[in-house]
Amino acid sequence: QVQLVESGGGSVQAGGSLRLSCAASGSGFSINSMGWYRQAPGKQREWVAVATSGGRTDYADSVKGRFTISRDNAKNTAYLQMNSLKPEDTAVYLCTVGTSVLNIMQTHWGQGTQVTVSS
C-alpha cells in the first residue's frame, strides 16, 4: 500500500546542515500530512515538524528557525532542511505520512535515518 524511504542522514559538525528526504511510494492513496519525528537513545520520540497538504507547516520550538519542512506533492516526497545543527539534534529521524484510502485514514512510518551532530 504505502512504503516510506528516508534518506539524507549522516554525520555533520555543529553548525552544519543536512537535508532529509522521505519518499512515499505505492498507489491508491492520497497524502494528507507529512511530518518528521526524532528519537534519541533513552529519550522519548519527539515531534519535529509537519506539513499539511494545504501547505501549512509547524515546528517544534527546539527547531524553529533552523529546520524547514517542505514537500513535493508530485513526487510524494517530504524534505527536512536542517541548518545550524546542534549536538542535541542527534537522533534517528523518522518520517511519518498520513494517508487516506477510500474513507480510511492511516499513518505510516519510515524506518528512520540517523543524524549525528558532533561538536
Image (cartoon, grey):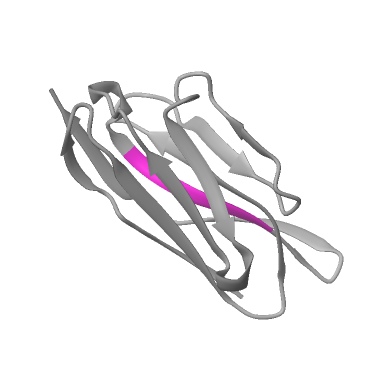
Identify the residue at horizontal 47%, vertical 52% (top origin).
79
Q: Residue furthest right?
A: 103
Whether residue 74 is situated above or below residue 116 in the rendered picture: below
Whether residue 12 is situated above or below residue 19 in the rendered picture: above
Whether residue 81 is situated above or below residue 39 in the rendered picture: below
Q: Within the magenta stretch, is there residue 60?
A: no
Query: Residue 119's quadrant in the figure?
Result: top left
On the image, the x and y values in percent for residue 45 come to 46, 31
On the image, the x and y values in percent for residue 50 come to 60, 41
Q: Within the magenta stretch, is there residue 93?
A: yes
Residue 112: tell me if it is visible: no
On the image, the x and y values in percent for residue 55 come to 70, 48
Majority SS type along the magenta span: strand
Identify the residue at horizontal 50%, vertical 33% (top origin).
48
Judged left or right of residue 51, residue 15 is left
Judged left or right of residue 64, residue 21 is left
Query: Residue 66's quadrant in the figure?
Result: top left
Report the label total. 0
Quarter of the image where the N terminus is located? bottom right
Judged left or right of residue 40, residue 36 is right
Identify the residue at horizontal 26%, vertical 41% (top origin).
115
Q: Residue furthest top?
A: 61
On the image, the x and y values in percent for residue 15 come to 23, 27
Whether residue 40 is situated above or below residue 112 in the rendered picture: above
Q: Report the magenta residues as a range.
A: 92-98
